[in-house]
Image (cartoon, coloured by chain):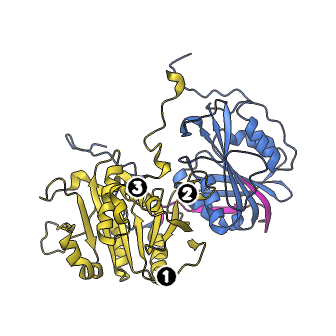
Amino acid sequence: MVSHFGEVIFPSSRAFWDDEDEYESDENLEHYLKLNVCWLKKKPEHMQKFIIIEGEPLIPFVKQCLCHNAEEVCIIETEDHKKVSVIYHIDKQIYLCIVLPHFDTKNAGTLVNQISDLLSSTESTISIVCRHVSQFQSTNIPETPSFLRILATKNANVAKYKIEPLEQPNIVFGVGAGVLSYAEFKGISAKLYVLYIDNFVLDSKCAEPLLQILTNETDCKLQYPKFTENFFSKGNLYM
Amino acid sequence: MIRLMEDINLQNYTLILPSVAVGNVGQLSVDLLISNLNLQKIGQIFSPAFVPIVGANAYHEGSSELITAIDIYVGVKECVVVLQIRSPYVGELTGFFDHLVRFVIERKIAKVIILASSYDYEKRDIQPQHLKLRYVASSGIQSENGQLFDDLSWISHKPKVTSDTRQEGKLQIPGGGFAKSIFNFLSHADIPCAILFKFCSEGDNIADAVALVCYLNQWIRVLGTNSDNLKYPPSWKHLFGKPPPHNIY
């Protein structure tokens, strides 16, 4: 922001998340996000499957599919009681964690750190994230409304469902990526599914691969979701 | 938190790490080192101060090995441990610096070299324009290698002296990320360390990275004759965007 007339403002670099381009150690840690994990029910000692959902179009869909009888068991919130994530108990030892859309990705590492004890007590972790196809870098982009790619730790069984691995130089960042990184770090079995869609909303066609994952990964009976009209505005160029 | 997948004796090794800085020059340089020396991944660092990322192996297509925000690579023949940092820092780094210092001390690593960059417009000294590489060395490195640096005609980066001339100059590397802070942290722990950096503008910084790697190689001599003909890692193929879609023609 120019504060004086005629002042030359150099653009900040792409290398940094914020404008701070030379790190100075900060004694005042108060402006860093602190998260509280509040268990509404007894914290599970062991989880068979922990599913993490991140990305706006996925949340209502997965909630409809899996959460019809599920109860909220845990809330992760900021110090000023703003919810950033909710954990549901789906069935037996299957839990679902939804990362709410307003959660700032820059704090993904902090959130993963907060749930690290849960990840350590989980047999298998599954993260599902959603990206627009324009972010997929390849010379061979599938011409389908949506497609899946997978990344997994060494000890995860990925051969079963024949999903193509995410090719370099594509990367995934955020909570899902943090969970997979942490699992790799600790030697826990984990998979990260990336759903690429060519739309801004999840319609029945785009959701097909997602339904396939949920069917494969959970033994629960899925509630087939209703696709509601979404009034998301893509711009005013064409009516 | 640092985890090594295999227990390797790193005594007297050189640790090389990038500072996430303008133009990502340090990170690109480390990519060049890993791919040209064919270094093996031996560990990982998990720190909430960095944005988590994952992807497929950046150096070998078809490999199922993951890359994460901070990975550790080793070259046994060259006696180097290389840390690659792939995402920006977003939090307090003291914990990360602490872990690194402990790792260096426990593993008896001989010295640490930080690769960085600084804004081109901050180069205000009277050296000719083409000389854009600088170094900052701790007293231990300076006493051991000062003569070599002089023979190589390296230019040291001088701390900026404030208007109050009685005060000691303050080391500043604008746009250099955490390079200066980690250098000070390591120096306080009596670990021999140095920063090598290049003044650059943001854009296609591959040439800057090549220059920085060649600069490093003048000192530690790990690349041999390959330094003139560096191989780029396959993950750089869409560094500046993907090709245009076929259906626009």
Residue at 31% across, 43% down: A1
| Secondary structure of residue under mark 1 | loop
Q: Percent position (x, y) of residue A83?
A: 63, 52
Write down the chain letter for disc 2: B
Q: Is A32 above or below relative to B190?
A: above
Q: Percent position (x, y) of residue A222?
A: 84, 42
Label 2 belongs to which residue?
B52
Q: Mark on residue B107?
A: 1
Is A205 in the magenta?
no
Q: Percent position (x, y) of residue B204?
A: 35, 45
Which region of the structure is painted magenta?
A30-51
Residue A115: tell me if it is visible.
no
Label 3 belongs to which residue?
B28
Q: Amino acid at mark 2?
A: Pro
| Separation of marks 3 and 2 at Cα, in angstroms | 18 Å
Label 3: few (<14), some (14–19) or many (≥20) C-alpha neighbours in 10 Å? many
Chain in yellow colour: B
> Which hue belongs to chain A?
blue
Residue at 45% across, 56% down: B88
Q: Nearer the viewer, mark 3 or mark 2?
A: 3
